[in-house]
Image (cartoon, rainbow, N blue to C red):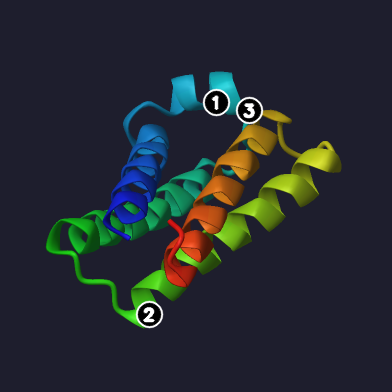
């Protein structure tokens, strides 16, 4: 589980911090946003989840609640990404994020059943 925790943690950290550090480039890739405070709020939350996953991966401590947080956050982002991208409310680039999140979810499941 160390690998998935570190990879997902780094991905979450980087995607979470991006809108906080440079909202303009974030919007160039993901599309214009009207509520920048909301984008930054989501960024902070994703960043913090990422930090938790990185720390768990480094310490190799995988409590059930951490695994739930990792899997549920990936699942939640998949649902939001796909629902709003296909309704054309957000950019289709979010479908790429959903695919990455599916990869994380599958990797966690494989790790839990002992094949990852």
Residue 65 got which mark? 2
Q: Nearer the viewer, residue 5 or 33?
A: 5
Towards the viewer: 108 or 91: 108
In the image, residue 30 above or below residue 111: above
For the residues labelled 1 and 3, the Cα–Cα distance comes to 5 Å
Identify the residue at the far front of this view.
115
- Name which of mark 1 and mark 3 comes first in the sequence: 1
Q: Residue at x 58, y 44 (%)?
A: 35
Q: Which residue is mark 3?
A: 32
**Picture layout, residue 81 above or below residue 2:** above
Q: Residues within 10 Å of mark 1 (few under 14, many from 20)?
A: some
Considering only vertical position in the picture, is 97 above or below 101? above
Judge depth for marks 2 and 1 and give the one in front: 2
Q: Is residue 88 left or right of residue 107?
A: right
Q: CA distance from mark 2 to mark 1?
A: 33 Å
Check disc 3: other Cα within 10 Å, few if <14, some if 14-19, many if 20+.
Answer: some
Which residue is depicted at the point 27% across and 62% down?
A: 52
Task: Give the percent coordinates (x, y) of residue 112.
Answer: 45, 70
Q: Quadrant of residue 20?
A: top left
Q: Which quadrant of the figure contains the N terminus?
A: bottom left
Query: Pointer 1 and pointer 3: residues touching (CB < 8 Å)?
Result: yes
Q: Position of residue 116 (x, y in %)?
A: 43, 56
- Depth check: give the residue in front, 67 or 16: 67
Mark 2–mark 3 Cα distance, whole angstroms, equals: 35 Å
Could you tell me which secondary element the residue under label 2 belongs to?
helix
């Amino acid at each position: 589980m160390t690998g998935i925790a570190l990879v997902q943690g780094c991905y979450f950290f980087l995607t979470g911090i991006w809108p906080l550090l440079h909202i303009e480039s974030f919007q160039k890739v993901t599309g214009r946003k009207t509520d920048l405070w909301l984008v930054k709020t989501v960024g902070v939350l994703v960043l913090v989840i990422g930090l938790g996953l990185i720390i768990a991966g480094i310490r190799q401590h995988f409590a059930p609640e951490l695994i739930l947080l990792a899997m549920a956050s990936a699942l939640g982002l998949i649902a939001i990404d796909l629902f709003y991208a296909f309704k054309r409310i957000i950019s289709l680039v979010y479908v790429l994020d959903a695919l990455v999140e599916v990869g994380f979810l599958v990797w966690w499941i494989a790790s839990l059943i002992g094949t990852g």
